[in-house]
Amino acid sequence: MDTILDSERRIGAVEQRLGALESTLSTLFAKNIGLVAQEPGAVAEQTSATLWLDAGFEHPAFYSHEVRGDGLGYHWMGREDGAVLTLPVTRRHPRRVEVYIAIFINEKTLNSFTISCDGRAPASYDEVKRDGMIVKSATYDAVSGPAGSAYTDVKLSIGAKVDLTPQGDSRTLAVGLHKIVVTEL
């Protein structure tokens, strides 16, 4: 019985350290990509954050910035099959993640595009047309314990992409994203 209690204590201590480490890493990553106010010793928690995939955005999973005929900017995803983006909204409360898709290669690439948050599947999911874009929206439950103080990690995954080499374009494309919004509920 003592060995079980000792093991449970050690597991609890490891979980606490992992939660603290996850929070620290998430904060450092968010600072590195310029999403967080960088006042000395202060990290601004937000109830909502928007990541614009504009001309200044760079990530290995995405191609360079492009603009639709109507002036709406976006980045094609397809260099890699997944991307994790950190936004400065803590995990302590339920959250909604909205991904604005400006363009997509075909229905298969659109339908196979998925969102997860903090390694979890969504509690609910919705897809609507809004402002000339497809908005995929998912809600996620709160995360308890030390891991709840970490920032929100949004994982984007593509299950299908199209190789454009036969058309003279060296890229493989799936969906073009305009912005990502995380909001505390």
Image: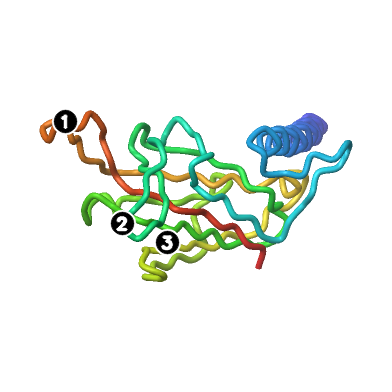
- Quadrant in the rendering for residue 21: top right
Q: In front: mark 1 or mark 2?
A: 2
Instruction: Of the two numbered discs 2 and 3 on the same chain, state the one appearing first in sequence.
Output: 2
User: Percent from the top left, x then y, of residue 126?
Assistant: 42, 68
- Contact flag, marks 1 and 2 (Cβ < 8 Å): no
Q: In front: 58, or 150?
A: 58
Q: In front: 126, or 122?
A: 126
Q: Amino acid at mark 1?
A: Thr
Residue at position x 68%, y 46% from top? 151
Left or right side of 91 for 110: left
Residues under labels 1 and 2: Cα distance?
A: 23 Å
Badge 1 crowding class, 10 Å Cα cut-off, few under 14, some 14 to 19, many 20 or more, is few
- Quadrant in the rendering for residue 12: top right
Q: Do we see residue 133 in this rendering?
A: yes
Q: Quadrant of the C terminus?
A: bottom right
Which numbered dot is residue 174?
none
Q: Amino acid at mark 2?
A: Gly
Instruction: Of the two numbered discs 1 and 3 on the same chain, state the one appearing first in sequence.
Output: 3
The residue carrying mark 3 is 136
